[in-house]
Image (cartoon, rainbow, N blue to C red):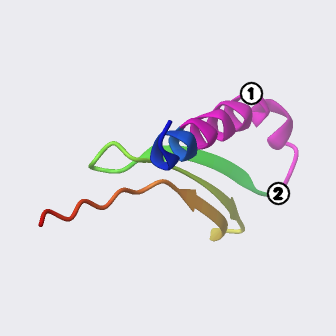
Amino acid sequence: MTIINHVHQTLSLLVAIALLSSASAAAVAGSWKPEFDSRELPSLSYTEDGKIVFLLGCGRAYCAT
């Protein structure tokens, strides 16, 4: 398993946990938001009072030689 696949699986697990815990997160001032960018790469952010406090994203770079 490559490191990229491992990171992608870990991030997917974090997104699933955030979605499952979203009901309890409603009582907290902030909110978790899983999303995908235009390249379908996942990210998870935590926003509090309209400001992003925590952002975790998975990205790839490809360099052809």
Three-letter residue code for mark 2:
Ala
Picture residue at 68% right of the left edge, 32% below the top: 19
Tag 2, which secondary structure?
Answer: loop
Q: Label 1 crowding class (10 Å Cα cut-off): few <14, some 14-19, many 20+?
A: few
Q: Position of residue 30 (x, y in %)?
A: 76, 57
Give the Cα distance between marks 1 and 2: 17 Å
Tag 1, which secondary structure?
Answer: helix
Q: Which residue is the site of mark 2?
A: 29
Specify the quadrant of the image occupied by residue 60.
bottom left
Question: Up-down: is 18 above or below 33?
Answer: above
Residue bounds of the magenta highlight: 9-29
Q: Which residue is the site of mark 1?
A: 20
Q: Position of residue 51 (x, y in %)?
A: 64, 72
Three-letter residue code for mark 1:
Leu
Q: Position of residue 13 (x, y in %)?
A: 65, 34
The one of 57 and 62 positioned closer to us in this rendering: 62
Earlier sequence position, callout 1 versus callout 2: 1
Q: Position of residue 65 (x, y in %)?
A: 12, 67
Which label belongs to residue 9?
Answer: none
Specify the quadrant of the image occupied by residue 22.
top right
Q: Label 2 crowding class (10 Å Cα cut-off): few <14, some 14-19, many 20+?
A: few
Magenta span: helix, strand or loop, mainly? helix
47 vs 36, left or right, is right
Specify the quadrant of the image occupied by residue 17.
top right
* Front: mark 1 or 2: 1
